[in-house]
Image (cartoon, rainbow, N blue to C red):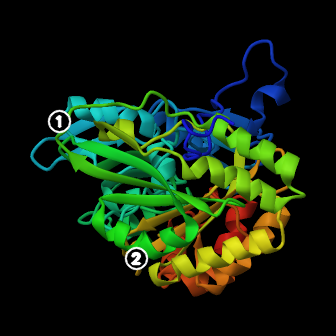
Amino acid sequence: MDLNRRTLLTLGASAAALAAGRPFAGLAQAEALAWRNWSGLQHCEPEERLAPGGVEELAAILKEAPRPIRPVGAGHSFTPLVPTDGTVLSLDRLQGILSVDDARKETTFGGGTRLGAIGRALEEKGQALVNMPDINKQTLAGSISTATHGTGLGFNALSAYVRGLELVTAKGEVLTCSANENAEIFEAARVSLGALGIITKITMENRAPYRLTRRVWSVPFDEMMEQAEELAEAHRNFEFYYIPFSGMCLGITHDETEAEINPRTSTDDDDAVMTLKALQEWLGWAPSLREYLIRSEMEDLPDDVYVDTSWRIYPSERGVRFNEMEYHLPRAAGLTALKEVRETIETNNLDVFFPIEFRYVKGDNLWLSPFTGRDSCSIAVHRHYEEDHTPYFKAMEPIFRKHEGRPHWGKLHTLGAADFAALYPRFEDFQAVRAALDPEGVFLNDHLRHILGAA
């Protein structure tokens, strides 16, 4: 097992996002228009797939294109936010830095700009994102629309760092939104699920470039349960993974530094993930032996320490595809819920091998942010894309819900509008803004009608 150099962390997805656009020459119409998300779980065959190159073209499309119209970024959401038999609208041609404000440390991007393209471009302008998630394939518009987040007690989800945006409505009206202009729409649009209109420009609050030291180490589960809160308080960024049927965790911290760059030689941990998969297949019948083998390897893992500029430290390549459920729980309930997750998996010998991710996120006041009103802990569970995720996630969701968890908007869940109305104090306010901007439901597919309760 090649586990001592592969830390079993940062599981997940490398880039996927199918390019939207007109049918390609040589392809049948249905084949050219078919859309799938990164994991392959969500799919549709829309009547049109379009990629406008500017606001005027977009406004014309919104008036005439087949309904429902659904925007797509990188296709990295696991929920059916995109599928439609109308129009899939790509933001791929709305990319790049549009303007820079040096004094305010703000930069305006095209909504389709990929997170992976932001770091270097911003550094050349003397800026950096305040924080980042550990996957950088998503578009900025898609990321803020689903409240994508990194980790760290002092850091919000990306949406909270939005200082302004441009929104094109179903009628083709172009709205500039900020705390001082169209303020109510701005509050709703920072986490909007693509239900209000198409976000074409986003102004982000940034900071000066910085370096991070990344440390990765292994520790027994019980020790991590005792140390986690202290580690979260002591470090800029902290998260950990529990490896099922191992009794071991892998911790990750990031701290700002002026040290010389000492980069990672690889950000790809796919070999480790597939090793865990093989062990589950070979030894699923013998959980004690499986735990002994994994624990034996992990107990001897040396600490990995790297130094690099922030945008190189945060993301990891994820080539092993999966489907995911992630819930955000009140901080005080996070570790208790994780213990219950572990007990449920291992007592029932559930068919699981993907590490379970645990992160900390600072609370905010955004209307549809899962972190609104409370500091949170996020617990994410994964299932290989070729396997049926339903039994596993069905066993996990009651634990998350018991602890007042809110699901990530882009990760699988079974909740509907009545559930969200109880979980979000400003849910009805969002509904009112949505109904005013899109009374005919141009942007509502079946999934959005279900979770928003829109007729």
Compared across the picture, whether 133 is left or right of 235 comes to: right
| Position of 98 relative to 409 (above/below) | above
Q: Nearer the viewer, residue 259 or 403?
A: 259
Q: Amino acid at mark 1?
A: Gly
Q: Is residue 196 visible?
A: no
Q: CA distance from mark 2 to mark 1?
A: 30 Å
Image point (58%, 78%), residue name = 405
Q: Is residue 235 visible?
A: yes
Relative image position of residue 383 (x, y in whole percent)? 75, 53
Relative image position of residue 157 (x, y in whole percent)? 41, 61
| Position of 31 relative to 312 (above/below) | above
Compared across the picture, whether 265 is left or right of 60 comes to: left
Q: Nearer the viewer, residue 233 or 442?
A: 233
Image point (66%, 32%), residue name = 18
Q: Which mark is residue 126?
A: 1
Q: Amino acid at mark 2?
A: Asp
Q: Nearer the viewer, residue 347 or 433?
A: 347
Relative image position of residue 52 (x, y in whole percent)? 53, 32
Compared across the picture, whether 131 is left or right of 333 comes to: left
Determine which residue is flagged by label 2.
375
